[in-house]
Image: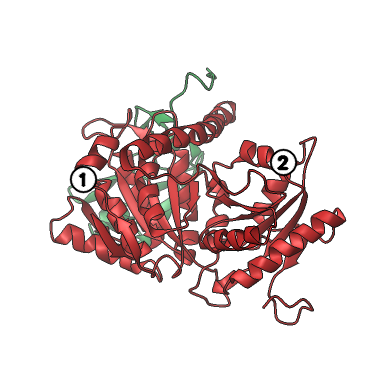
């Protein structure tokens, strides 16, 4: 796998996007959304630093393949409808 | 065309005739008139380039990095605190192997607040992987920008370069400058066409993560590139002379050193004053010479070793102080000479900080002191020159 300095480019170049890294594996806490209380304000979608949230009819759907469990969405949600649940429980 | 212009306008014309395609810069004294002139060129249509006004020097360099990654020839200019704010991105530009060219109008770091010449800002960036050229005249500023693009864009180099003007002494002083014809510059400097660049519709990550088993190979390549930059620049200057009729002495510009017994190493505008002092002392029969340090990176290691073997005394003038054992130029030159079988007595002079004048009289006394120190076989290695309160009088 390791290459000689003569075989590598000037700077490391990857031809695949960083979405190949399944950052969801890092997660210790999982966001759980109570959709019934969602006000469709979209703040969770705007603040998610990993773009792991998509909006479906204005309501967040969290992609757990990439969500690192940082909890920013739960912190920002004015309706307090996102709860961080420890992985392996609940 | 021969015109009378400041060092700053020489920089702007240098970027213009080099056909820089993207300019991102933030104004700072005493660099501002470079940016103003380039903004004029672009807005009047005289220069076909994208001018990106930014909110900081960090952003200016980030914009240059992005533009160069997309294959554009980029230029920026800054000074002192602006340069140090760029520090992080300077590392990125060299690590990503982007041949950005920048003018740094070398100015003291605060506090105490100062807008005058001092090389601390440039010297503090020596480990960023940029080539650093200290200039002596406005013409040299313009010419070095053209040469820097040509040398840095060659496939074996691909490193960024800093062209350094002394604040006010060059930046705001007018001299006759020949602005070469565009066709001539075009024949010398082809368009920038890197082998790898970001392209629309093609997903690629540049400068991505590598693990410990692969990192060192990239740094090793960058080291080789800096070595190659040394030789490449000499070839570029040779070619420059053929086309434009001017040259500046390579990396270490030797003046009356052939039969010199003691030499002074100096960079920037002080070297210009030292030239006159050498002439005056030569008329009095003193075997003195000047070694103008033109490029701090690539460092002229072999040149110093060749010179060191020929002289009995070598003084080094540092217009900055690095809080190590001595000034930065001195420490590195001494390091180069250490393993030489025959080396001169050396002495470091810290002078001209924060724009204090380095007068001909001071330089005469420095030459006198090097000769005396060489005769004695050594002495105190580092002396601060012209500091009020110290016993020695220099004026």
In the image, residue B320 sits, relative to residue B200, either above or below, namely below
Location of mark 1 (residue): B182
Residue B107 on image: x %, y % = 50, 67
Residue B189 on image: x %, y % = 29, 37
Location of mark 2 (residue): B310
Disc 2, SS? loop
Chain drawn green in the picture: A
Residue B204 on image: x %, y % = 32, 32
Viewed as shown, does residue B197 lie left or right of B301? left
Residue at 61% from the left image edge and 59% from the top image edge = B278
Towards the viewer: A84 or B386: B386
Binning the other alpha carbons within 10 Å of mark 1 as few (below 14), some (14 to 19) or many (20 upward) gives few
Viewed as shown, does residue A73 lie left or right of A42? right
Chain drawn red in the picture: B
Q: Are marks 1 and 2 on the same chain?
A: yes
Marks 1 and 2, the one that precedes in the sequence: 1
Residue at 43% from the left image edge and 58% from the top image edge = B137
In the image, residue B224 sits, relative to residue B356, either above or below, namely above
Q: Quadrant of residue A51?
A: top left
Q: Chain of mark 1?
A: B
Residue A61 on image: x %, y % = 28, 44
Q: Quadrant of residue B308?
A: top right
């Amino acid at each position: 796998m390791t290459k000689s300095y003569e075989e590598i480019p000037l700077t490391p170049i990857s031809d695949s996007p960083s979405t190949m890294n399944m950052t969801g594996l890092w997660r210790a806490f999982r966001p759980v959304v109570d959709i019934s209380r969602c006000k469709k304000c979209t703040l969770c979608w705007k603040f998610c630093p990993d773009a792991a949230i998509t909006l479906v009819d204005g309501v967040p759907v969290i992609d757990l393949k990439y969500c690192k469990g940082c909890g920013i969405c739960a912190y920002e949600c004015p309706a307090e409808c996102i709860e961080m649940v420890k992985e392996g429980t609940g | 065309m021969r015109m009378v212009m400041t060092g700053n306008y020489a920089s702007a014309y240098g970027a213009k005739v080099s056909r820089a395609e993207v300019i991102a810069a933030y104004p700072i004294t005493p660099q501002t008139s470079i940016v103003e002139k380039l903004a004029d060129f672009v807005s009047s249509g005289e220069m076909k380039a994208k001018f990106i006004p930014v909110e900081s020097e960090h952003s200016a360099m980030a914009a240059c990095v992005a533009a160069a990654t997309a294959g554009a020839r980029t230029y920026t200019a800054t000074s002192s605190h602006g340069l140090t704010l760029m520090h992080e991105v300077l590392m990125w530009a060299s690590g990503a192997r982007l041949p950005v060219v920048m003018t740094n109008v070398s100015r003291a770091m605060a506090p105490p607040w100062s807008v005058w010449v001092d090389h601390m800002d440039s010297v503090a960036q020596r480990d960023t992987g940029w080539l650093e050229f200290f200039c002596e005249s406005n013409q040299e500023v313009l010419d070095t920008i053209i040469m820097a693009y040509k040398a840095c864009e060659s496939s074996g180099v691909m490193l960024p370069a800093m062209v350094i003007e002394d604040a006010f002494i060059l930046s705001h002083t007018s001299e006759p400058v020949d602005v070469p014809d565009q066709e001539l510059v075009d024949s010398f400097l082809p368009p920038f066409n890197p082998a790898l660049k970001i392209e629309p519709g093609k997903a690629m990550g540049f400068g991505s993560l590598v693990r410990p088993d692969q990192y060192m190979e990239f740094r090793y390549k960058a080291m080789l590139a800096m070595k190659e930059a040394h030789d490449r620049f000499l070839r570029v200057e040779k070619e420059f002379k053929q086309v434009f009729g001017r040259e500046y002495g390579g990396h270490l510009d030797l003046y009356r050193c052939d039969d010199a017994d003691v030499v002074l190493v100096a960079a920037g505008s002080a070297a210009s004053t030292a030239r006159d002092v050498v002439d005056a002392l030569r008329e009095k029969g003193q075997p003195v010479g000047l070694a103008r340090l033109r490029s701090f990176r690539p460092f002229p290691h072999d040149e110093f070793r060749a010179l060191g073997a020929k002289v009995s005394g070598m003084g080094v003038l540092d217009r900055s102080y690095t809080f190590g054992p001595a000034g930065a130029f001195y420490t590195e030159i001494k390091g180069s000479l250490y393993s030489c079988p025959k080396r001169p007595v050396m002495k470091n002079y810290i002078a001209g900080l924060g724009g204090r004048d380095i007068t001909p009289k001071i330089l005469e006394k420095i030459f006198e002191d090097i000769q005396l120190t060489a005769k004695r076989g050594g002495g105190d290695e580092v002396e601060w020159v012209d500091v009020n309160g110290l016993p020695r009088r220099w004026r």
